[in-house]
Image: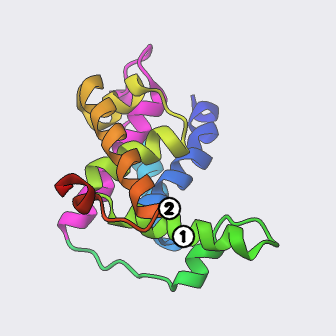
Amino acid sequence: MIRQIEEEIPRLRRFARAMVRDATLADDLVQECLERALSRLHLWRPGTNLRAWLFTILRNLHINGVRRRQPVVDIDAEAQAAIGAAPGSQFVRMELRDLRRALALLPNEQREVVLLIGLEGISYNEAADILGISIGTVKSRLSRGRRALRLLMEGESPSDAADA
């Protein structure tokens, strides 16, 4: 069981970093998630999806932190562009910077679905379990989120396109 949890740590870290946009805060969030999961392992039902259970814990901790209005340290744009970027091409860094900015402009509900499915490769069923919503809602939020991202990456505002 511990090995299965350890295998999920890289995915948890990526999702946490994408949500909070700060590596240190993300690592703290993952650590708190792992502590919570291990201390409540008796609550996990064998045969259910461990990944979904862990992501649900992580997401709930993040939401609770936001509700408590914990300060979020925003790192500068260049540092954000360098996180996870391949060395070399300035163009790639600029695209990553623009993508991070566009993701930040999405409503939280759309951003979560885009990150879970697009970044983590989680199935629609798992995303629905993690977020506590129906698969139809996952598909709808993903579709709207992808469309908004496309428009933002093209320099348009999603609200402008909706008005047209």
User: Which sits in the foreground, 164 or 5?
Assistant: 164
User: Which sits in the foreground, 148 or 77?
Assistant: 148
The reply to whether the magenta stretch includes residue 123 is no
Is residue 4 something that shows in the picture? Answer: yes
| Region of the chain picked out in magenta, as a range | 40-68
Element class at badge 1: helix
Name the residue at the right extreme.
Answer: 88
Q: Position of residue 30 (x, y in %)?
A: 48, 55
Left or right of 55 in this view: 78:
right
Quadrant showing the C terminus: bottom left
Q: Position of residue 110 (x, y in %)?
A: 31, 48
- The image quadrant of residue 90 is bottom right
Residue that mark 2 sits on: 17
Q: Amino acid at mark 2?
A: Arg
Q: Amino acid at mark 1?
A: Ala
Q: Quick check: marks 2 and 1 in contact, CB under 8 Å?
A: yes
Instruction: Please name the predominant secondary structure of the magenta segment in the image.
Output: helix
Name the residue at the top extreme.
Answer: 47
Q: On screen, 70 above or below 26?
A: below
The reply to whether the magenta stretch includes residue 43 is yes
Left or right of 81 in this view: 22:
left
Element class at badge 2: helix
Instruction: Please name the residue shown 27% across and 56% down the image.
Output: 161
Q: On screen, 67 above or below 149?
A: below
Residue that mark 1 sits on: 23
**Crowd around label 2: few <14 · some 14–19 · many ≥20 (10 Å):** some
**Crowd around label 1: few <14 · some 14–19 · many ≥20 (10 Å):** some
Q: On screen, 88 above or below 117?
A: below
Instruction: Please name the residue shown 31% across and 54% down the image.
Output: 61
